[in-house]
Image (tube, helix red, strand yellow):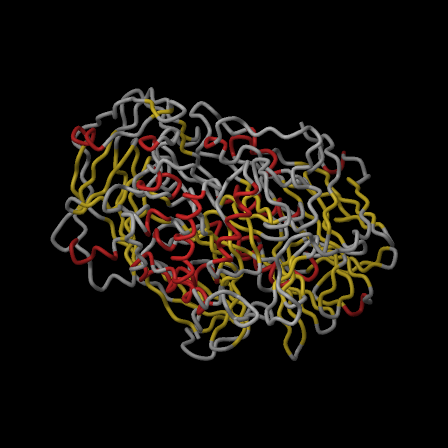
Amino acid sequence: MTASPEEQPAVPFRIRVSSPTPVTGTPLEMGDADGIGRRVQLTSRYLTRDGAPWIPVMGEYHFSRDLPENWEVELRKMKSGGISVVAAYMIWILHEETRGEMRWDGPRDIRRFIQLAQDVGLEVMLRIGPWAHGEARNGGFPDWLQALPIRHRSNDPAYLDLTRRWYAGIEEQVRGLFHTAENPSGPIIGIQVDNELYDDGPHLAALRDIAEEVGMSASLWTATGWGGAELPHGRVLPVYAGYSDGFWEESDTGWPAFGVMHFTYSTVRDDLTVGADLREAPAVVHGGAALGADDPWPFATCELGGGMAIAYHRRPLVDPDDVTALALTKMGSGSAWQGYYMYHGGLHPIGARSTTQEAQATGYPNDMPSRDYDFSAPLGAAGTERPHFHALRRQHLMLDAFAAQIAPAAATIPEPVDGAPRWAVRSTGTSGFLFANNHQPAIAALEAIDGIRFGVQFDDRELTVPTRPVRIASGAHFVWPLRQRYGAIPALTVTAQPITQRTTEEGTVVIFAAVDGIEVELQLEGVRASDVSGAEVDIDDGVVIARPHAAPGLACEVHVGDTTLVFLDAAQGDAVWRGDIGGRDSVVIWQGSGWFDTTFRAVVDDRSREIAVFPPLEEAAPAELPREGTVFTRYEVPAASASRELDAADFPCAPVAPVRRGGSSNRLSAPRDADFADAAVVELAVHPDPHEGERSILELDWTGDVIRVLLGDRLIADQFWYGRALEIDLTPYAAELETTPLTLQAFAWSPVSPVYVDPRVRPDVREPELAIHSARVRSLRTVALA
């Protein structure tokens, strides 16, 4: 049993930080020359943009797995979520399914996608393959390429000739969009060659050579570095991964052993197990390998798991906090580049010759759904904004506002101690940021820890934060500033997470989010007690200790000279947005979905909601509400009818799919097309309402094993059940749905199924279970606030 705070020793958990070693250049053959506009350069610890520290936030969105009519809004959502770079795979099979017929039309139009990204304000990391994986058939290779008698993914001249033609096709499409000295506004700042190639550094170097020979140019050249990959020294920047779970594990695995490292602060960058299902033998490195910890270039990631794909044999249930805690842990471990895979889910297209998902039929170990690639991502395949979209935005706004302070700071990580929290400090020697994580996935949740204080010895003094012991709840993860300058405050330490700041003629406003269950405590250096208002003030050894009078919320303001500190509660912290409204740099608090497009488009639902804006709206403003505090103006956004229930019939029977094994690892196999002749079938009439909104999403809450949704004879959606509703964008099918119902084909969950499903949702039944619990159409309606 954990002792109460009063019974805990007074001594805090301590580490000593000192000024980090000076940053230097890197041995990488990349980065822009001095004098280039919007230049991107590398130091040994972080990236710079026009000479200033910069922390890119990158999100993967596969344009070819969505419809072109969705791209602009979805890119705006990404930008509004704090993404600065959009990453996109070029999946060869989708562009040249038939040899010699390279297509760039419709959802394959990479040029249009990149131009839209540029219009929205995003830069681009182009992942050009040739082998991409991304759970695409043959790893993205067209069937004709896969069948050729050549050494794939090697320097076989025949393979390189084909690669050259593929790269040249891409270059022709995106010509003029590269960021160069002649075109400093070009959006393509980076190129990744291949993916998860472990043992052929010379081939990766050859791929970069070919790309440059056909005319591609980039500030940054990357390759995936995990799995102990052999990379060509100096030619590529290694980028790393971190997932909370993995569909590639066996069906009898609980929480994979690799998971702990991604929720523990460490300078180790490499996870040897990611993508291990594609290797003939486990990765082996010598005992003294630093696994990236000693690399003389920034710690960059490209695949922090935004969720997880679902395979037939193994179906992880990744929670939003799994994603946000993992991301914050990487940040505290020294990450200089936060990259998410996937940030936006999608659908596997159906090709003219085959479906395009990875499957045992092509020699892959795992059967993947024919259409579903939602990934439980922050933005779902249907554009749904999930809870981790909002919680990650809080982190991303912090990285944007305070990159100059965070990027140069080096990580100091204490040795693990029983009963101690997992924590780290990124510091410049006299100031820093304290990161703490007490979260792991539910299957291995960490217990609450009582009586916690942290002691940080800087070059010039020791700091104890907080001054009173606190309880860190199970699942808590946060970052606190240590001796940071904000406006008129020379040095502020506070038990709240910084989100963003905005300076006006009247002064500086800084927005923080409190941690649930932990009192907001400020330690202010270089100010007088009389300068502080809105808080109870004490003096301790020359440091002003302040505790706000108000509970966290809009009215919780502490004023120090012309600087206003606003302390929101945790839920409000996840509701902070920042973007352009009518030409004004605006901070918005909105606990709902939305995006910026010169206005703020708030997605309305069945109940009225409050929105708070700083500075105030000028046009199209709804009714004002009484003020709380001095910074934000509050408005009421009225409700709008946003959903309707459909009459969903019960399945007439509950058949169980045949049990088979296959693929290279003899894993459980998904039902084949022919098996669905024996599936249970019901029809679901939608009858769209033309006045329903800008987009209509079907939410199908069901229990079973596998479901397919057809419109006529077309497969428009499918899902291997894992505990979450199936979301389907009905907008493209509105005309057909007026007269044609959806057909649902499904198999029941077997009480003896060996498939892995999270124990929290796994059905505890004695008979096969197949049920539709609800079918609801949710209409996306927005209100433009200017």
- Residue nearest the viewer, comparing 767 with 21: 21
In-image side of 213 versus 541 (left or right)? left
In-image side of 33 versus 394 (left or right)? right
Residue 561: image x %, image y %? 74, 72
Q: Is residue 599 above or below residue 639?
A: below
Residue 280: image x %, image y %? 48, 27
* Quarter holding residue 640: bottom left
Q: Is residue 26 above or below residue 312?
A: below
* Quarter holding residue 511: bottom right
- Residue nearest the viewer, comparing 292 with 651: 292
Locate the C terminus and report the quarter of the image it occupies. bottom left
Locate the N terminus and report the quarter of the image it occupies. top right
In-image side of 709 versus 284 (left or right)? left
- For the point 18% across and 42% down, the residue is 743
Residue 707: image x %, image y %? 26, 36
* Quarter holding residue 587: bottom right
Q: Is residue 209 above or below residue 112?
A: above
Residue 47: image x %, image y %? 64, 58
- Residue nearest the viewer, comparing 124 with 230: 230
- Residue nearest the viewer, comparing 424 with 51: 51
- For the point 71% across and 69% down, the residue is 487
Total labels: the figure holds 0
Farthest front residue in view: 157
In-image side of 435 versus 633 (left or right)? right
Farthest left residue in view: 739
- For the point 78% across and 65% down, the residue is 490
